Image: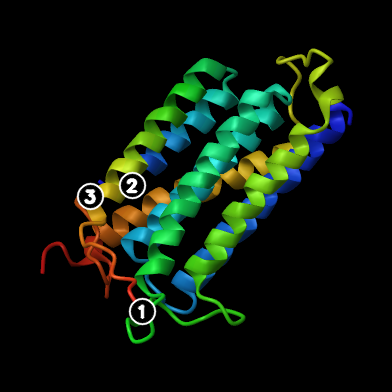
Amino acid sequence: MSPELSKLLNALGLIAIGAVLTMAFIDQVWFGELPCPLCILQRAGLIAAGCGLMLNVVFGPKPSHYGIAIIGAVASAAISMRQVLQHIVPGTGFYGPPVWGMHLYTWAFLFAVAIVIGSGLMLLGDRQFSQMQSASGRLKGLPLIALLLFLVLTLANIFSTVALCGTGLCPEEPVDYELFHMND
Amino acid sequence: MMSVPFVLFACAIGAAWLRHRSLSVGFWLVGVTAMLVLFRVHVTEVLSIQL
């Protein structure tokens, strides 16, 4: 696998993470499903994993970048699994309605596992690491779009989290945006 | 406080954009640490998964 192909695949992975985060925002804004603290941390975990792919896109593929993606995805999977286990016993309830038969935290777990497997498969391509990548080349096309999308969604998550939780910790089951009710 | 990891990850992206790889990895590392601390703070109850 050439470094160029690896960069392109990493950009596609970054767009996939962007698509998941966008869907989470659609669920939040359009359907009014406010995210719980663990849901917010799962989003952060996906962004942490995406940082590894982003480094591959910007600086060229390196094994350490895949390590960053795997560590981020494992952290995200651990948070999702905690929430799955919290509701796994019948009668213990759930958080949010299911989407295509599974709750969002289950989807988040599966997506995090997919990132780990994908990074493992990408690490099999030794040839992508054999050529030195120029760090000064300007990004263009799909990698640039992927990077901009990732940046915008990360910034949107900052705004969303501050709006939802204010400056402190988030309520376990948020019912409204804290920021807009600070003076009430 | 919950937005801290996102802020740090945004800084990591910004540093990468400006071609500072080590700084970017540093922001990422602090971001992951902050995320795990917040996870620990929010998860206080013991899991009960006995069937």
What is the distance, in whole Å, between disc 1 and disc 2 at their CAs?
Answer: 36 Å
Q: Quarter-wise, where is residue A37 in the image?
A: bottom left
Q: Same chain for labels 3 and 2? Say yes or no.
A: yes
Check disc 2 and report the residue beneath it. Answer: B3
Instruction: From the image, tell me which residue sits under label 3.
Output: B41
- Where residue A15 appears, as percent x and y from the top left, is 68, 50
Residue B51 image offset from top left, x and y in percent: 36, 79
Asked whether the residues under the numbered discs 1 and 2 touch, taking CB atoms below 8 Å apart as contact, a structural biologist would say no
Given the current orientation, which residue lies at the most extreme left position? Answer: A184
Between the C-alphas of marks 1 and 3, the distance is: 27 Å
Amino acid found under the numbered disc labelled 2:
Ser
Q: Is residue B37 above or below residue A7?
A: below
Looking at the picture, tell me which residue is in the foreground, B5 or A32: B5
A123, A52: nearer the viewer: A123
Check disc 2 and report its element: helix, strand or loop: loop
Q: Chain of mark 3?
A: B
Of tags 1 and 2, the one toward the viewer is 1
Answer above or below: position of B47 versus A149. below
The chain holding disc 1 is B
Circles 1 and 3: CB distance less than 8 Å? no
Mark 3, Cα crowd under 10 Å, few <14 / some 14-19 / many 20+, is few
| Residue on which disc 1 sits | B51
Residue for point 45% across, 55% down: A42
Residues tagged by mark 1 and mark 3 found on one chain of the structure = yes
Q: Amino acid at mark 1?
A: Leu
